[in-house]
């Protein structure tokens, strides 16, 4: 009974996370790209306000700190959907550099440094994990059998 | 790639606009024309505005942002697909079967004194999909042809329970969530104090997470269903459990659902709580016989997943919550209405068991009576 009710709740939760992180990364990416004067002249929309950057940074930092807690506590004490927590823990176990990459990224954001290609690659890895879970729940919702 | 993504987003915009035009060009059933159809058009208009804003943002021309733009496109396209599945198809399918079921669900809302807006019932499901509710799109889906039968209908009250839970979670569970955490913390402590197997620590952590994420809500909806429809809810659950025996779900919980056995214990606890003890005996005897007949595996550590203490505590909370939010219990409905739907469902299960050969005729004539009653109510 009613897998759809719970799946739709899961789906909404994971879409919210995905949107929040994706939009924040777009802002940080724009900020990084805007240091290239040629690109800046070509694309006027690369200009982002200080407030937007601060908000994006806060969202990313909050998420990264939550991830740190999840990894340290082996998954307990988080409101994130459990399947996402499990996938993040799997990644932390299988990728020897994942934890240190997350720490570097957190440090760069906390210290207001311009993010490097490696930092964006770490964010992309996180978004890929979220994408896989999102599509998995979406498929179940679309087939309506849970 | 940038042109390709712009093309995809334009294609999506056309699809959304086509769907709006299609809805505008159709004659809709009067039941839904100014409600469900209108809100679907609003959902589509909102989606259309989001797509246009994406096209106007200038981000799509920046090739360095392509992967993020693709993700935005996938989100928008998924939203379109969900509207198509959960609203557009519901509108296209709407017929006299839905009209009858929706009048019936409105009557149920009146009988149980639920003040929430009434969801739309649709028959887009097949029997495998059974019953479900989608709170965001405010629909309850049941199998095609369900308007011709009564025995599964107690589960409609379970689905209504999800909508009640969405609004009244705190009223229904009180501080049970804290109680739940304390319970599993004590169990974890006992692992150390009593020198039990350390592997139990992970079992308790995972079990707590499942309770918090899904099992609690499912139990609450079973308890609401039982509170509202009485013993018929237990019989329908026994039917479902029988069907699920092949999937070995009697004792095996899933990520989303507690085991059937634990759910039945919760149902019995609520029947006791609302004073239907005599009625409970017959169904619990049948249930115990069923358990002795089926040979299904019991998972390791099962006794830790759903202890009676948790189920009984939750039942007390939900019973009190239902009363506090003013829901009329099964017995209260009997006192206030001459023949509420909940009573008809109990009669249906009684008829099926006492006179199975004549049940089909009985059911057909009762459904005909309900239809007449609904038409009379409507004309008054």
Image (cartoon, helix red, strand yellow):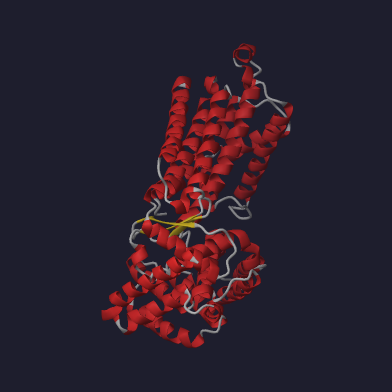
- Give the residue displayed 53% in from the left and 23% down from the top: B60
Q: Does the rendering let one see residue B205? A: no
Q: Could you say where residue B331 lies in the image, as x and y percent from the top left?
A: 54, 80
Left or right: B101, with A35 as reference point: left
Q: Please say if B315 is above or below A69.
A: below
Left or right: A143, with A132 as reference point: left
Tell me which corner region of the image, top left, top right, bottom left or bottom right, holds residue A37: top right
**How many numbered badges does the structure rendering display?**
0
Q: Please say if B259 is above or below B35.
A: below
Tell me which corner region of the image, top left, top right, bottom left or bottom right, holds residue B292: bottom left
Q: Could you say where residue B78 lies in the image, as x and y percent from the top left?
A: 46, 40
Q: Please say if A144 is above or below A45.
A: below
Q: Could you say where residue B169 lies in the image, as x and y percent from the top left?
A: 62, 62
Q: Could you say where residue B136 lies in the image, as x and y percent from the top left?
A: 53, 51
- In the rendered image, the quadrant that contains the N terminus of chain A is bottom left
The foreground one among B220 and B226 is B226
Left or right: B73, with A52 as reference point: left
Left or right: B231, with A69 as reference point: left
Q: Does the rendering let one see residue B164? A: yes
Q: Residue furthest front?
A: B380
- Give the residue displayed 38% in from the left and 77% down from the top: B348
- In the rendered image, the quadrant that contains the C terminus of chain A is bottom left
């Amino acid at each position: 009974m009613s897998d759809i009710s719970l799946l739709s709740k899961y789906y909404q939760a994971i879409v919210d996370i995905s949107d929040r992180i994706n939009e924040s990364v777009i802002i940080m990416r724009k900020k990084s790209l805007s240091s290239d004067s040629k690109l800046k002249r070509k694309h006027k929309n690369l200009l982002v306000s200080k407030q937007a950057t601060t908000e994006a940074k806060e969202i990313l930092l909050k998420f990264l700190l939550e991830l740190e807690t999840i990894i340290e506590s082996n998954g307990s004490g988080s409101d994130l959907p459990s399947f996402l927590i499990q996938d993040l823990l799997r990644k932390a176990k299988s990728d020897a550099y994942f934890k240190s990459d997350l720490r570097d990224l957190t440090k760069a954001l906390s210290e207001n440094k311009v993010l490097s290609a490696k930092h964006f690659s770490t964010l992309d890895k996180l978004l890929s994990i979220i994408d896989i879970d999102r599509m998995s729940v979406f498929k179940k919702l679309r087939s309506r059998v849970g | 790639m940038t042109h390709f993504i712009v093309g995809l987003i334009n294609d999506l915009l056309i699809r959304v606009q086509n769907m709006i035009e299609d809805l505008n060009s159709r004659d809709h059933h009067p039941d839904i024309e100014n409600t469900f159809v209108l809100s679907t058009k609003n959902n589509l208009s909102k989606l259309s505005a989001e797509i246009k804003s994406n096209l106007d943002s200038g981000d799509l021309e920046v090739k360095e942002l392509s992967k993020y733009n693709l993700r935005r496109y996938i989100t928008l396209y998924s939203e379109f697909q969900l509207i198509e599945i959960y609203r557009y198809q519901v509108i296209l399918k709407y017929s006299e079967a839905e009209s009858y079921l929706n009048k019936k669900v409105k009557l149920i809302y009146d009988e149980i004194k639920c003040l929430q807006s009434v969801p739309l019932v649709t028959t887009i499901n097949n029997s495998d999909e059974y019953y479900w509710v989608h709170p965001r799109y405010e629909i309850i889906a049941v199998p095609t042809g369900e308007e011709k039968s009564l025995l599964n209908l107690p589960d409609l009250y379970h689905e209504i329970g999800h909508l009640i839970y969405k609004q009244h979670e705190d009223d229904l569970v009180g501080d049970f969530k804290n109680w739940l955490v304390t319970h599993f913390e004590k169990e974890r402590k006992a692992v150390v104090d009593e020198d039990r197997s350390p592997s139990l620590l992970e079992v308790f952590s995972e079990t707590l997470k499942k309770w918090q994420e899904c099992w609690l809500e499912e139990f609450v909806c079973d308890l609401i269903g039982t509170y509202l429809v009485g013993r018929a809810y237990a019989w329908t659950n026994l039917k479902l459990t029988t069907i699920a025996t092949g999937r070995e779900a009697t004792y095996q919980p899933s990520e989303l659902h507690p085991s059937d056995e634990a759910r039945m214990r919760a149902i019995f606890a609520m029947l006791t709580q609302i004073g239907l003890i005599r009625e409970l005996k017959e169904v619990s005897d049948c249930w115990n016989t069923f358990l002795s007949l089926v040979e299904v595996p019991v998972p390791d550590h099962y006794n830790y997943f759903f202890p009676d203490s948790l189920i009984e505590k939750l039942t007390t909370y939900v019973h009190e919550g239902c009363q506090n939010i003013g829901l009329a219990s099964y017995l209260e409905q009997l006192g206030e209405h001459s023949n509420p739907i909940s009573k008809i469902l109990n009669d249906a299960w009684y008829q099926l068991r006492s006179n199975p050969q004549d049940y089909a005729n009985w059911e057909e004539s009762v459904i005909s009576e309900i239809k007449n009653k609904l038409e009379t109510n409507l004309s008054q």
